[in-house]
Amino acid sequence: MSDIERKQIIRLKKLSKKIRIDIVNMIHGAKSGHVGGSLGLTDIFTSLFFQILKHNPENPNWEERDRFIVSNGHVAPLYYSVLAHSGYFPVSELSTLRKLGSRLQGHPNKLDLPGIEISTGSLGQGLGVAGGMALIAKNEKKNHKIYCSIGDGESQEGSIWESAMFAGHNELSNLIAFTDRNYIQIDGNTENINKLEPLSDKWKAFNWNVLSANGNDFEEILSVFEKAKSEKKKPTMIIFNTKLGFPVEFMDGVSKWHGTAPSDEDAKKSIEEIEKYYSKFEL
Amino acid sequence: MEKIKNNIFEKPDMLPTRDGFGKALLELGETNEKVVVLTADVSGSVRTNWFADKFPNRFYELGIAEQNMVSVAVGMSLENKIPFASTFGAFITGRVWDHIRILLSYSQTNVKLVGTHTGVTVGEDGATHQILEDIALMRVLPNMTVIVPSDFNQAKKAIIASANFNGPVYIRLGRQKTPIVMAEDAHFEIGKSQILKTGNDVTIVACGVLVYEAILASRELEKIGISAEVINMHTIKPLDEKALLESVNKTGAIVSAEEHQIAGGLGSTIAESLVKSKPVPMEMVGIKDEFGMSGTSEGLLTYYNLRSKNIVESVKKVIKRKR
């Protein structure tokens, strides 16, 4: 790894620490929200907003921007935090999450905040929207990419597979989707509830280029996105292996932490664990 | 008063409203390069094949995957296109309703949904395809505009108007050839109803195929000394409350007529409005909480009591209720 890359990763780590602390505080303050997926996906969203995506918070509708659709809208606390730290709206507004009159709705609303391409929250809808954007960009020979975040539990929705078939059929190589593969949904483990495996084979069978990486490791995240960007023929699905609530260990693998707000004590403990995790690195 | 065709009592011209959609798209293809067309495996039936032949680069065949079709249309609208997504009314409304609720209605995207093959006039395909609930499903969604053109000429104008209108729109069309009521040069404006005949004793408000039946009914009523005002309420939402109120202030009684469930349809929409401002005796002609069935289009209109004679009976009833 070069010095520059090392510096980039240190910068991303510092940002991701702030974002994780935001997430815990926001959801604790709101007394509801989805903490597990938000924490687990933090390294990926941080990589996207502060390294991978071409975007301009001063001009959210910049035509050449990369598009990013958050199909799993319940990770709104994470989404809001990366948007705010990027400069789309004041960081001070994060504490209004889920409160009456706030622009930070429980699930993201396109009309409320700059930087949100489409309202999501009802699962299975974002991938098709991303596909429509990708097909237009492909036909018009535009250079930007279309990214789409989906949950693993979300992949039980039928319309994900309608959209998967569509993107494969149309060879949307400018579309890069990724799955938050933490195996946890509200009622338990995905494999006990409605088996997703073999998940990579499913996407391959739908004519996608399939990659996988550790979604809680910046080096792996950055390199897998670079690889995805060079794909010329098929849409890419990156299966990111993540841990629910990472790096808060008491949340790992516990389905309750998909959608439960931490109590005062849980919040304190979560932040301690986050601080402990980051103290291992020289930041 | 808006101009209607002068041959409707003798030998009306017959064309399906879906043809009006197909013709309007051909026009839009020439005049508006932002217009794109999406279809779910029924391009011949919904008449988007005409556009596809002429503008293949702006036509998208999505296969039998309606939820994806509507989501893709939304993505295209975000790229500054004006997408018309079309299939049979049953499959573009009910089947996709949650996607429509979030991606069109809540997000206020500029997508046009066109449902052909609506109502019992679908005919032989039967109940599964004869959607009678689509007006209700669409009009209950905030920010949604709902249009039910009366005939071929009006369908064509409604499609062109909706392309020039910013926001989500549902346009309800039919399969069967039906009488052309509106003149070629009749005006059309979204949200502005049209008086087709003035009268003093009762207001008949209709949409879609039933506009023709309402006109026939008004002529029968004339013969027995009842003067009916006929309104073509082509836009269900936003409802032209002003015109409605003006008419009932004069007539004091109203009959609604539609090829749709009474629950949630045109009749309900009117009742919700008038009960606040000017409650008058009202009767509703429409489908009474039941499904359609196989048969000919003409046979089914008669079977389900959607004919001019049914409107006449309802008018007589409502007039008796006037004080």
Image: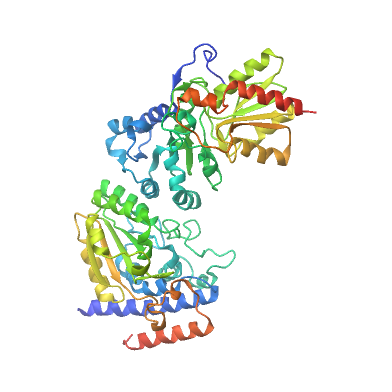
Q: Does residue B31 appear left or right of residue B309 in this picture?
A: left
Please give left or right for residue A2 compared with residue B230 in the image: left
The quadrant of the rendering that contains the C terminus of chain B is top right
Q: Is residue A213 above or below residue B158?
A: below
The answer to whether residue B1 of the structure is visible from this angle is: no
Q: Is residue A233 above or below residue A193?
A: above
Q: How is the image coloured?
A: rainbow
**Outermost residue toward the right in this view:** B323
Whole-percent x, y for residue B162 in the image: 47, 36
The residue drawn where x is 40% and y is 82% is A248
Task: Indicate the position of residue A238 as horizontal and vertical percent values.
Answer: 27, 65
Q: Is residue B160 visible?
A: yes
The picture places residue A12, in percent across and down from the top left corner, at 33, 76
**Camera-side residue: A79 or B114?**
B114
Frontmost residue, B160 versus B269: B269
Give above or below for A11 relative to B196.
below
**Is residue A96 left or right of B323 when viewed as pictured?**
left
Residue B264, relative to residue A191: is it above or below?
above
**Which of the 4 image quarters holds residue B59?**
top left
Percent x, y of residue B225: 72, 15
Q: Quadrant of the N terminus of chain B?
A: top right
Farthest residue, direction top: B10
